[in-house]
């Protein structure tokens, strides 16, 4: 049992750190090539997760039997040639009404996070904002669920808030002597809009987390595959109003220069012909594939542990992504204020999580304090 648990945790952490860090890099590259492709990327991510998860949630029903996709074969049809085959979704462990609220919040969060790249918001700010969920979690938990928090948790949230502010200020676009005042004003306005979009996405993400935590607490935490599938599957019809923008982005990506695949291969392979692919599609495809890996790990983790542990693991993952984005892929060392703000965010997250794992003293309980 210990070996099985260790293997399970190794798989989860590999999916999260490998998939999510690679996904952040691919998203940064995609945004650098085409800042307006956020909606297309979001749709592609939702489609691939839905297609991969669909077989596990299908069953085939004949007149006499109901068979799951995994055990269905041609012999079921041959044994009952007169029966009528019906394909339907398996019964859900969690009512569809409980998923719909999370679906809307999840879709809006994903669209807003990817749309922020359009407004000159760098990946470092994306990472920091996605690490600042403690702030909105505390406020929404207090206002919505009536939760109480300890002084250390409140202090931790203040540290995170200060860290986000420092990071946002340190990475704002600088004025340039080569640009006009109107251009500088336009750049600053875009950055402010992008930060506002990320703030809205942060609030929606925290609301979704609270709703998801409440659902798993009521129906059990063993339904991560169902959650991952329905959050993506039920969101697909909501992309219909966005189809004109998506078609435009597809045309832009198709018009990019073709990638010379054979140029990276040994000489003996260059005599073969290879299909060309527009170069803008490469990071998009990598992003979509790694998104599948990333969300699989996060949903597995959410189904195994409490939201506090999920917060801790994802905070460490985002710290790794930040270092990779600035130092490894960015080729720089980063601004001092950036690292100070980032440190405050992650220290606050660690303090908050550590305090959440402690039992509240009896004296605190008598005063009405309650752990999240």
Image (cartoon, rainbow, N blue to C red):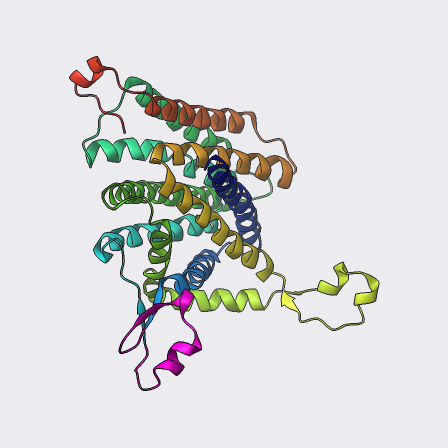
What is the quadrant of the N terminus in the image?
A: top left
Give the side of residue 372 with respect to residue 169, left or right. left
What is the quadrant of the C terminus in the image?
A: top left
Residue 285 place in picture, x, y as percent? 55, 59
Quarter-of-image position of residue 325: top right
Examine the rendering and report whether any part of residue 366 can be seen. Answer: yes
Residue 149 place in picture, x, y as percent? 26, 24
Give the side of residue 131 with respect to residue 334, left or right. left
Q: Residue at the far bottom: name it.
A: 82
Q: Nearer the viewer, residue 271 or 246?
A: 271
Give the side of residue 82 with respect to residue 264, left or right. left
Residue 123 place in picture, x, y as percent? 51, 42
Q: Residue at the far front: name it.
A: 79
Q: Is residue 19 above or below residue 133?
A: below
Q: Is residue 78 magenta?
A: yes
Which residue is located at x 60 percent, y 59 percent?
Answer: 282
Q: Residue at the far right: name it.
A: 267
Q: Nearer the viewer, residue 81 or 217?
A: 81
Give the side of residue 288 with respect to residue 70, left or right. right
Which residue is located at x 41 percent, y 41 percent?
Answer: 301
**Magenta span of residues:** 61-85
Examine the rendering and report whether any part of residue 172 can be seen. Answer: no
Q: Is residue 39 above or below residue 363?
A: below
Q: Nearer the viewer, residue 305 or 228?
A: 305
Residue 45 place in picture, x, y as percent? 45, 57
Q: Is residue 23 magenta?
A: no
Which residue is located at x 43 percent, y 62 percent?
Answer: 47
Q: How many marks?
A: 0
Quarter-of-image position of residue 217: top left
């Amino acid at each position: 049992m210990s070996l099985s648990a260790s293997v399970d945790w190794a798989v989860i952490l590999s999916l999260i750190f490998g998939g999510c860090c690679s996904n952040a890099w691919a998203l940064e590259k995609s945004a650098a090539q085409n800042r307006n492709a956020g909606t297309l990327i979001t749709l592609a991510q939702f489609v691939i997760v839905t297609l991969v998860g669909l077989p596990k949630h299908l069953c085939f029903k004949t007149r006499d039997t109901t068979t799951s996709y995994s055990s269905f074969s041609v012999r079921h049809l041959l044994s009952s040639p007169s029966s009528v085959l019906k394909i339907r979704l398996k019964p859900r462990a969690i009512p569809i009404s409980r998923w719909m609220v999370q679906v809307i919040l999840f879709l809006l969060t994903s669209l807003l996070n990817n749309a922020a790249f359009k407004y000159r918001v760098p990946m470092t700010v994306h990472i920091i904002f996605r690490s600042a969920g403690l702030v909105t979690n505390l406020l929404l938990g207090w206002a919505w669920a009536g939760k109480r928090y300890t002084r250390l948790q409140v202090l931790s949230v203040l540290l995170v808030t200060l860290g986000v502010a420092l990071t946002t200020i340190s990475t704002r676009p600088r004025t340039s002597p080569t640009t006009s005042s109107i251009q500088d004003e336009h750049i600053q306005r875009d950055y402010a809009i992008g930060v506002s979009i990320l703030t809205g996405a942060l609030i929606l993400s925290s609301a979704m987390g609270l709703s998801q935590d409440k659902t798993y607490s009521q129906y059990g935490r063993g339904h991560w595959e169902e959650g991952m599938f329905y959050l993506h599957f039920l969101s697909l019809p909501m992309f219909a109003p966005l189809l004109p923008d998506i078609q435009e982005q597809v045309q832009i990506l198709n018009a990019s220069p073709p990638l010379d695949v054979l140029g990276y291969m040994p000489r003996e392979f260059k005599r073969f012909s290879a299909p060309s692919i527009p170069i803008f599609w490469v990071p998009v495809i990598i992003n979509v594939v790694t998104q599948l890996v990333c969300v699989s790990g996060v949903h597995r983790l959410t189904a195994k542990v409490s939201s506090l542990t999920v917060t801790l693991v994802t905070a460490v993952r985002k710290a790794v992504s930040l270092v990779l984005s600035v130092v490894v892929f960015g080729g720089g060392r980063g601004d001092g204020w950036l690292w100070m703000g980032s440190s405050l965010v992650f220290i606050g997250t660690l303090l908050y999580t550590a305090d959440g794992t402690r039992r509240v003293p009896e004296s605190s309980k008598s005063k009405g304090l309650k752990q999240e």
